[in-house]
Image (tube, helix red, strand yellow):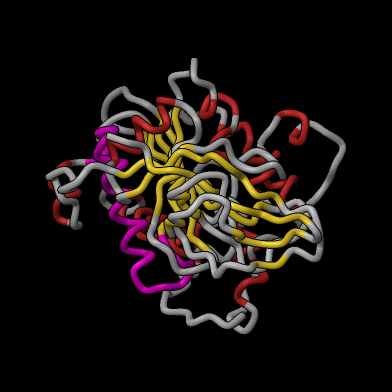
Amino acid sequence: MSARIETPFPDIRRWAESNTGLPYVWSFAGASAGPHVCVNALVHGNEVCGAITADALLCELTTSLTPTRGKLSIAFANVDAYHAFDAAKPFESRCVEEDFNRLWDAATLSGPRDSRELRRARALRPFYDTVDHLLDLHSMLEPAPPIALAGDTAKGLALANAVGLPPHALVDSGHAAGKRLRDYAGFGDPASPKSALLIECGQHWEAAVADVAMQVTLRFLAHFRMLDGGWLAARGLHDAPPATAQKVVDITQVVTVQSPAFRWVHNAQGLEVIANADTLLAMDGDREVRTAHANAVLVMPVPQPKVGQTAVRVGAFRAG
C-alpha cells in the first residue's frame, strides 16, 4: 500500500517537558471558573493532523494566549508511536504494540496485561479522569469525507451537532476489539455531564486534513467559550453555523473479521451508499458479508483488516 504524504510532521519533542508533570500533557488556567476542556492528539501515531493542531495551539498558549475560563489542556497521547513514524513505512506506526484506542475499560486498564500503550494509558488515566469535555482528533486510512464520531449517547450527538463540522456524524458503540477513549468512563455514561467527540478528519496525510482538524478544534473551543472570540475569528473561525445540518448515520451492522482469509468483493468507499439490500460486500472465510438493508452507508472500510478488527461499519442515514 503506497501513500502520498502532503502534511508536515511537527517536531513535538519540545513539548515533552510539560507544566503538568505528565510528559506531553499541558494545562492552562482560565481567567474565570469553567470546565476542564482537552484537545487530544496522537491516539494513533501516524495520525498527524491532531499533532499539527496541538502544536499550533501550544505555541500560542505558551506565549500570549490565555483561556477565558476553566482549564484548557493539550495532550499528545501515543507519542512513542509518533516518534517511530517512518515515511517509507507510513502505515506501520499506528501503534507500537497494540491499539491505544481499544484499552479504555476499567478491566483492561487495571488488569494484568502489559504493553507500551497500556503503560501510557495508565499514566494518562488520572489526567483524563479530570477532563469534562474531550475533543479527540483522528484521521483515516483511506480517502473519505471527514466524519464526527458521536458515540451512542444523546449528549454525544448533541455535542457533534453543536460543533457542526464535519457535515456527517456517526452514532455507534465502537468496536468489538475494545473500548475507545471517547467512550471511557463519564464520556460514555449517559448520566454524566462529561462529554467527548472524536473527529475523523480525512485521510491521514492529505493536505486538507490539518485544516479540518484546526477548524473543528476552533469550533469546539468556541462552543465551550474557552478562548477569546476575536482570537478565534482571526484564525479562521466562521461564526455562522454550517449552511446545512449534519447528516446523521446510525450504525446497524458492525463487520468484525473472523477469518484470516477475509477479502473484499465490493470495492468499498467511505460514506458510499449501497442501494440494494443483500449486496455482497466481502467473504470472511466461507461466510458471506452482505448489506442487511437497502441504502446502506459504508463507514470507514479497512482494506486489509485483521482477525478481531472492524472491517467496516454499516449504517443508515437518519431521516429528518
> Could you say which quadrant of the image residue 252 lies in?
top right
Q: Is residue 262 above or below residue 100?
A: below
Residue beneath the point at 63% across and 63% down: 94
> Could you say which quadrant of the image residue 2 lies in?
bottom right
| Residue extent of the magenta highlight | 202-227
Whether residue 18 is visible to the viewer of this picture, yes or no, is no
User: As drawn, is 12 to the left or to the right of 83?
Assistant: left
Q: In the depicted view, which residue is nearer to us: 18 or 197? A: 197
Q: Where is residue 176 in the image (x, y as percent from the top left)?
A: 70, 41
User: As drawn, is 317 to the left or to the right of 280?
Assistant: left
Magenta-span inclusion, residue 120: no
Q: Position of residue 244 (x, y in %)?
A: 19, 46
Residue beneath the point at 64% across and 43% down: 175
Q: Position of residue 134 (x, y in %)?
A: 45, 37
Q: Quadrant of the image for the N terminus? A: bottom right
Q: Which residue lies furthest to the top in this view?
A: 191
Q: Where is residue 53 in the image (x, y as percent from the top left)?
A: 38, 58
Whether residue 70 is visible to the viewer of this picture, yes or no, is yes
Q: In the depicted view, which residue is nearer to us: 85 or 3? A: 3
Magenta-span inclusion, residue 218: yes
Q: Quadrant of the image for the C terminus? A: top left
Q: In the depicted view, which residue is nearer to us: 256 or 218? A: 256
